[in-house]
Image: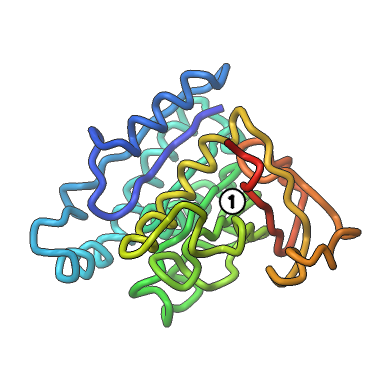
Amino acid sequence: MFYMFVSGFATYINRTTAHLVRETFKHVPNSYLIIIDHSAYTNNTDGPITSYGRSVQHVYSIGAKLAQMLVQLNQGGIRASHIHAIGHSLGSQMLGHVGANFIKATGYKIGRITALDPAGPCFKNSLKEEQIRAGMADYVEVYHCDDGGLGTSSVLGDTDFYMNKGSDQPKCNFPSVNKCSHKACVAMWMASVTHRFTARQCNDYKLFKQRTCASNKTTTAGFWNPGTAKGIYYFSTEDYK
């Protein structure tokens, strides 16, 4: 499998997120990994608000360029079905354009897109066609960890997974609860390479917590998700140490 990881706003190749991804995929056999550093366009040099607004304006163009790279790799022999693109935050939103432009260029869809807490600010009122969404790969899975905060509150994928209640993650405290919960999506997904999280289909966290959905379908969230589930699923990380 060929994996591409696209990080979020103000993230650099030498930061902890990229290091975590590299270390994780060392343990994934028969895999090739490329980590995208788009910090030349999405850095924080002008302050968070101004810099983020500028960065959002580059989402389409970066997504289109990444699609061109994947098209060339596909022409070089890597099957579209063997491409798995993973994005976090702003990187997740870029993957919508990656998928759309790859389809336009080849007529095929890449195998899978994993969108980890797609960015919410500046996308709340955007057209669905401007965001990551179902149809941009053979299978699109979306994970919500800071729902309605730094992450989107929109249901966008073939499957939308809500980690715990989808926001305010455990061990994330004021005043950095949003930033911490947002980053927790990456840590959880990378941890899922070695730890399996069972997710249950349910439309509401309270119902999930009350076990009202206990008889509903289950699937595995994270790396080992078989890609057959559709709809909204919740899973807990309480048992994960």
Colour basis: rainbow
**Foreground pick, 133 / 80:** 133
Packing grade of label 1 (10 A; few <14, some 14-19, many >=20) is many
Residue 72, quarter of picture: top left
Q: Residue at x 63, y 60 (%)?
A: 160
**In the picture shown, does residue 22 fall above or below 222?**
above
Q: Where residue 3 sits: x, y (%)?
A: 49, 33
Q: Which residue is mark 1?
A: 137
Q: Amino acid at mark 1?
A: Ala
**In the picture shown, does residue 165 fall above or below 72?**
below
**Foreground pick, 233 / 126:** 233
**Foreground pick, 29 / 78:** 29
Q: Where residue 120 sits: x, y (%)?
A: 41, 70
Q: Where residue 195 sits: x, y (%)?
A: 64, 32
Locate residue 146 relative to residue 69 in the image: left or right: right
Locate residue 222 relative to residue 97 in the image: left or right: right
Q: Seen from this angle, which residue lies furthest bottom?
A: 125
**In the picture shown, does residue 79 fall above or below 167?**
above
Q: How many marks?
A: 1
Q: Residue at x 47, y 41 (%)?
A: 187
Q: Where residue 139 sits: x, y (%)?
A: 65, 50
Quarter of the image that includes the C terminus = top right
**Foreground pick, 185 / 169:** 169
Q: Seen from this angle, which residue lies furthest left?
A: 46
Q: Residue at x 50, y 57 (%)?
A: 169
Locate residue 170 relative to residue 217 in the image: left or right: left
Quarter of the image that includes the N terminus = top right
Residue 212, quarter of picture: bottom right
Badge 1 marks a residue whose secondary structure is loop
Q: Residue at x 23, y 62 (%)?
A: 55
